[in-house]
Image (spheres, rainbow, N blue to C red):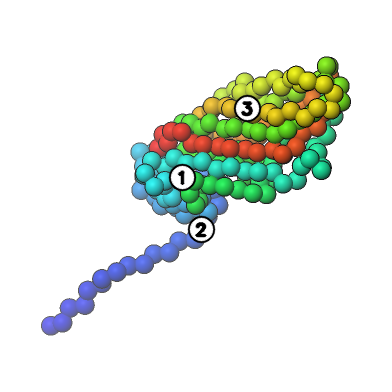
Amino acid sequence: MAYIYNTSYKVQADVDTEEVRLQYNIEEGAYVTTPSGVWTVFDGEWVKLYPQSGTGTGLGWTRYDDGQFTSEAKLTLAQGVEVVLPNNAASVYRSQTGIDYYNSSTLKVLADNENDTYIMTIVFKYQASNANQTYLEIHFEGGNGTPYDRIRDTITFPKGNDTAHDYHGVFQYYADANFISNGSQWNITAVGGAAQIWDIIYFIQKTQNYA
């Protein structure tokens, strides 16, 4: 009697969005594919299986360069008006394919897993027509629970009126459940007078993969 053996199996699932994945019930051993990678549930939490870095740690970095506000078309910040720091990610550089820590459509900074830690560098040029009385306030948007708005900086103008300066700020933070679900934004305000900024760059590095 001849036997027939199955030598391979193929299962293909739809690719869901991150929003849909986060709405699923946590079921041990579940597998989901999203544009950011392949996920499973282990020990009651979502864990990203792929892509990982070449060393297998899941660490990596991305750089996002804004292409809208340049030296020829500066962003004007009105005095006392808080706005989201814009970055349209016209140019993106990654340590490896599939890593993304920022959404240029929503202007939201993203994270992979709860309790992951990150270092984010913000770079831009800035100037003010009244440098003696003007300064900038920049801070992370506050979330539900963790006070991310405490991650902030006050930026002064050390030289004269309409003199361009280079800002370089480095911030460390971790991701809580609300950050994973909703992301966060950088808000900026000109205080004491109007100001202009341009050549905005985000550099985001994951330094610890909790999962």
Q: How far apart are marks 1 and 2 (CA)?
A: 17 Å
Where in the figure is residue 184, as x and y percent of width and height?
Answer: 62, 34
Foreground disc of the pair 3, 1? 3
User: Pointer 2: what residue?
Assistant: 15
Foreground disc of the pair 1, 2? 2
Which quarter of the rendered picture does the C terminus lie within? top left
Q: Are discs 3 and 1 less than 8 Å apart at CB?
A: no
Q: Can residue 104 be seen from the camera position used here?
A: no
Mark 3 or mark 2, earlier in chain: 2
Mark 3 or mark 1, earlier in chain: 1
Q: Can residue 210 be seen from the camera position used here?
A: yes
Considering the numbered disc 1 on the image, is that residue within a helix, a strand or a loop?
loop
User: Pointer 1: what residue?
Assistant: 25
User: Pointer 3: what residue?
Assistant: 169
* Amino acid on which disc 1 is placed: Asn
In terms of image quadrants, where is residue 208?
top left
